Amino acid sequence: MRERLALSKPKKGACGLTGSWRVFRPVVDREKCNQCGICEIHCPDAVIDEELKIDLNFCKGCGICADVCPKKAITMVREEK
């Protein structure tokens, strides 16, 4: 088991819920992912947990997780209206 850093998680009111304004959302390809945790560390809203579950209630769709993923296991897909 690999050591994890303590990260603060979003709270209702502290960061605010994303609402309906997000244009893109991250999708993880678990076949490509090696669970390195780089996406979790770099997420500015701390919405990715160690099981790679992304809390879309707080995700802003910035795409940083997809940009930093060394395996390109995260892609940003357009939200459907």
Image (cartoon, rainbow, N blue to C red):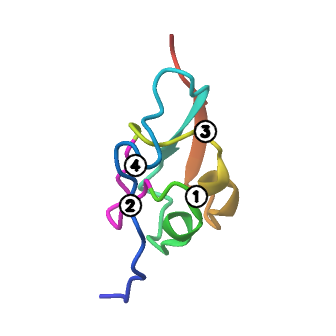
Q: Position of residue 22 (x, y in %)?
A: 57, 28
SS at badge 4: loop
Q: Amino acid at mark 3?
A: Met
Q: Amino acid at mark 2?
A: Lys
Q: Nearer the viewer, residue 11 or 25?
A: 11
Q: Position of residue 77 (x, y in %)?
A: 58, 31
Q: Is most of the magenta stretch helix, strand or loop?
A: loop
Residue occupied by mark 1: 44
Magenta residue check for 79: no
Q: The magenta stretch spans which residues? A: 47-55
The span from disc 2 to disc 4 (Cα, nearest Å) is 12 Å
Of the residues under marks 1 and 2, which one precedes in the sequence?
2
Residue occupied by mark 3: 76
Position above or below: 25 against 9: above
Residue occupied by mark 4: 54
Residue occupied by mark 2: 9
Q: Nearer the viewer, residue 40 or 21?
A: 21
Of the residues under marks 2 and 4, which one precedes in the sequence?
2
Of the residues under marks 3 and 1, which one precedes in the sequence?
1
Seen at 56% across and 71% down, the residue is: 38
Of the residues under marks 1 and 4, which one precedes in the sequence?
1
Q: Amino acid at mark 1?
A: Pro
Of the residues under marks 4 and 3, which one precedes in the sequence?
4
Q: Quadrant of residue 7?
A: bottom left
SS at badge 2: loop
